Image (cartoon, helix red, strand yellow):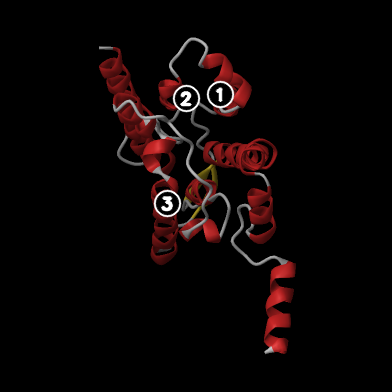
Amino acid sequence: MRTLLILCYGVLCYVVFFLTFLYAIGFVGDFLVPATLDRPQPAGPATLSAWIIDLALLGIFAVQHSGMARHGFKAWLTQGLSPAIERSTYVLLSSLVLILLFWQWRPLPRSVWDVTARWDESALYALFALGWLLVLTGTFVINHFDLFGLRQVWLYARRKPGTPLPFKRHFYYRIVRHPLMLGFLIAFWATPHMSVGHLLFAIATTGYIVIAVKYFEERDLIAAHGSDYRRYQREVPMLCPWPRPHDRASRSTSRVTH
């Protein structure tokens, strides 16, 4: 019974995540879902309380998302929970915090830019879709089911140890070290209709992504993979997929040599 409950819990957490992920696309893109970054618009002008609430919601997500990912919190959490559902619990709570943000977000509808030219608007929506596609497909390049807790509960159900995945770099991960985060950045900024609220969301999430990746996730990855990851840091950029100066110099030297 315990095994079945753990397996069902992991599946339920995944379903909540996936529905939240789909809603997030409409929330940021301002379509299909009832509440978005820009809808429903308030009856009057934006108030100070709207700014405070939105910043608080973004702060809650940042603290939860980074805090629960730290090894110290994981060790504390698994004192009372099976290690098999640690990742599923993280996924569930992250989804619930996002749902809170969707529910309580206060739109700041004043326009920052508004692209109306047909082809320019279409190009920005295409870039928006590309960002979300990069996020979703990037999870499968590493291991989608491990990332969202399904692999762990499935191994537990089969009485197999939940061994960590080996460090690999392939496909997107040969271009940037964090393609999922790059996909989010593209999706958050690629919009033909940028409101003040959307801009606040994009700036805050960009700052969070850069800080969280550089000062938290990268340190955890170095601790887990050691010299392999340090070499990877030297060879592949973190978020911006353009060659580094020493990479261009290396290619120039190679051409001269040949």
Q: Tell me, yes or no, whether the two marked residues, 2 and 1, touch with CB atoms within 8 Å.
A: yes
Which residue is tagged 3? 141
- Specify the amino acid type for callout 2: Tyr
Nearer-the-camera pick, 81 or 64: 81
**Residue 90 image label:** 2
- Specify the amino acid type for callout 3: Val
Which-is-in-front pick, marks 1 and 3? 3
Q: Which percent across, then down, holds residue 6?
A: 32, 19
Q: At numbered mark 1, what does the secondary structure look like: helix, strand or loop? A: loop
- CA separation, marks 1 and 3? 24 Å
Nearer-the-camera pick, 116 or 85: 85
Q: At numbered mark 2, what does the secondary structure look like: helix, strand or loop? A: helix
Residue 48 appears in the rendering: no
Nearer-the-camera pick, 255 or 238: 255
| Residue 39 versus residue 92 in the image, above or below | below
Mark 2 or mark 1: name the one nearer the start of the chain.
1
Residue drawn at (39%, 61%), measured in percent from left and top? Answer: 122
- Specify the amino acid type for callout 1: Met
Q: Residue furthest front?
A: 160
Residue drawn at (69%, 69%), measured in percent from left and top? Answer: 247
Apparent side of residue 153 relative to residue 69 in the rendered image (left or right): left
Nearer-the-camera pick, 185 or 89: 89
**Residue 68 image label:** 1
Q: Residues within 10 Å of mark 2 (few under 14, many from 20)?
A: many
